[in-house]
Image (cartoon, helix red, strand yellow):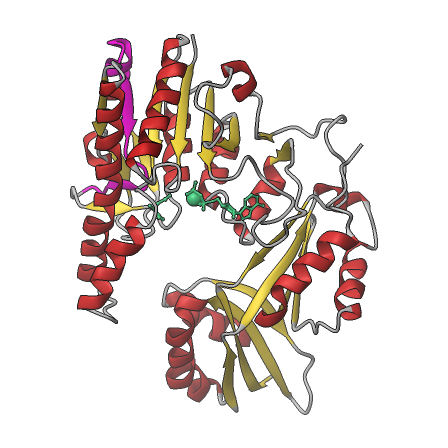
Amino acid sequence: MALIVHKYGGTSMGSPERIRNVAKRVAKWARAGHQMVVVPSAMSGETNRLLGLAKELAPSRATEAYYRELDMLAATGEQASSALLAIALQAENMESVSYAGWQVPIRTDSSYTKARIESIDDQRVRADLAAGKVVIVTGFQGMDDEGNITTLGRGGSDTSAVAVAAAMKADECLIYTDVDGVYTTDPRVVPEARRLLTVSFEEMLEMASLGSKVLQIRSVEFAGKYKVPMRVLSSFTPWDIDIHEEAKSGTLITFEEDEKMEQAVVSGIAFNRDEAKISVLGVPDKPGIAFQILGAVADANIEVDVIIQNVSKDGKTDFSFTVNRGDYARTMELLKEKVVPELGAQEVVGDAKIAKVSIVGIGMRSHVGVASKMFRTLSEEGINIQMISTSEIKTSVVIDEKYVELAVRCLHKAFALDQAVA
Ligand code: ADP
Ligand code: ASP
Ligand code: MG
């Protein structure tokens, strides 16, 4: 008998019919003798709907008090879907109980809308499992030290599931979604994308952080830290398929570099349209400018991604970096009002219509010329590269947003990702 955590995303929970299917699938696993904890997302569209209502009432609030209420509001989506799943399981004659994050409790810090899980008390869940119940734990939410409801950032139910699996030392965490695994790139953009049978934890971490929204990055971090066996698979197969077949389907996240694993140099391509580029022009080139610019940005709790500083000319230099698009206006304002006058820089210019495209692969460690092949491929398509950032296992470029799909498609082809690996 194993302890298994299942996570079902919004589309998988999207209608009463789909919830019934999830219940039948979970009941099948429970009847096969497994202890089952299930972490559902809100029904698809529900989180957007709720946050949209808040925006209608207060289009541009950015106060702590407002963010607190956003979490109160958004958390109701998962509470509803969890109760519905418990009801559907009961209708299948499975004993089942659902808990909101605060009832478990899942404790987090107080950063509303992007809280981090600090601890999970598994006693209540364990007692129910021992009593033969299927336990449903709401995704996406927790409670801070003062008892306020918090949420974990968009896509955060993945993280809830992996954190619960880690806390309970589950045998496996299965992430059920609307695709049948992790692909070489988003199959919605490149239909030729191929499903990966396995993907290393490091590659998955890079892909998630670089924009592949199939898994929230923190869920991958948790899986790595606690070595949670984790698989991404489809919730759209018939619920009654053979359980052994199901258990081997999808994409397994692996922690060891196995000789027999697919050994492509580039394993996947990620892209992200959520960033904006900001350049501070004509900055006096002297020690401390990076700190003065980025320190002020960090103090405002704004995360910076790609950074470049140009060579100086006549004692002046240009300094560019990217931030989340949601932080763009705030960063521009901060730089114009505070940093530019203090630094004596010439001006600040920005571009919100950029995208970051990245190639990822642990094979890049041992192969030269991978980045240059990427640059050549893009230049052959006439795509201008505005910024570059590299690490051992990835190369990212910032380009004009309008070329993102073209860039992803031609890189996918250039690195033969559409072809099966022997
Ligand atoms: P869920 O609601 O189940 O959490 P998400 O929408 O968050 O589902 O994630 C699944 C989606 O991620 C897929 O429908 C797909 O379009 C997208 N996606 C992006 N990159 C990839 C990738 N490399 N492999 C698979 N899916 C990807
Ligand atoms: N419902 C939340 C969201 O839409 C969390 C999740 O689906 O993982 O972001
Ligand atoms: Mg998701």
Toward the viewer: 114 or 78?
78
Instruction: Give residue 16's quadrant in the image.
Output: top left
Please give the name of the residue rendered at 39% of the width and 12% of the height, measured from the top-left corner.
34
Instruction: Give residue 410's quadrant in the image.
Output: bottom right
Please give the name of the residue rendered at 26% of the width and 57% of the height, measured from the top-left corner.
51
Q: Is residue 82 magenta?
A: no
Q: Is residue 242 left or right of residue 156?
A: right
Q: Is residue 406 left or right of residue 124?
A: right
Please say whether residue 288 is visible from this viewpoint: no
Query: How many badges with numbers are in the image?
Result: 0
Residue 12, how many percent across, how many down?
Answer: 39, 37
Residue 133, how many percent across, how many down?
Answer: 26, 14
Q: Is residue 140 magenta?
A: yes
Give the residues in magenta. 126-145
Quadrant in which the N terminus appears: top left
Quadrant in which the C terminus appears: top right
Residue 170, how many percent across, how many down?
Answer: 42, 20
Residue 166, how many percent across, how many down?
Answer: 42, 27
On the rendering, which quadrant does ligand 3 occupy? Answer: top left
On screen, 413 above or below 134? Answer: below
Please give the name of the residue rendered at 17% of the width and 60% of the height, measured from the top-left corner.
65
Toward the viewer: 235 or 106?
235
Please say whether residue 404 is visible from this viewpoint: yes
On screen, 110 above or below 158? Answer: below
Q: Is residue 204 left or right of residue 102?
A: right
On screen, 384 above or below 141? Answer: below
Toward the viewer: 67 or 54?
54
User: Which residue is outermost to the right?
Assistant: 368
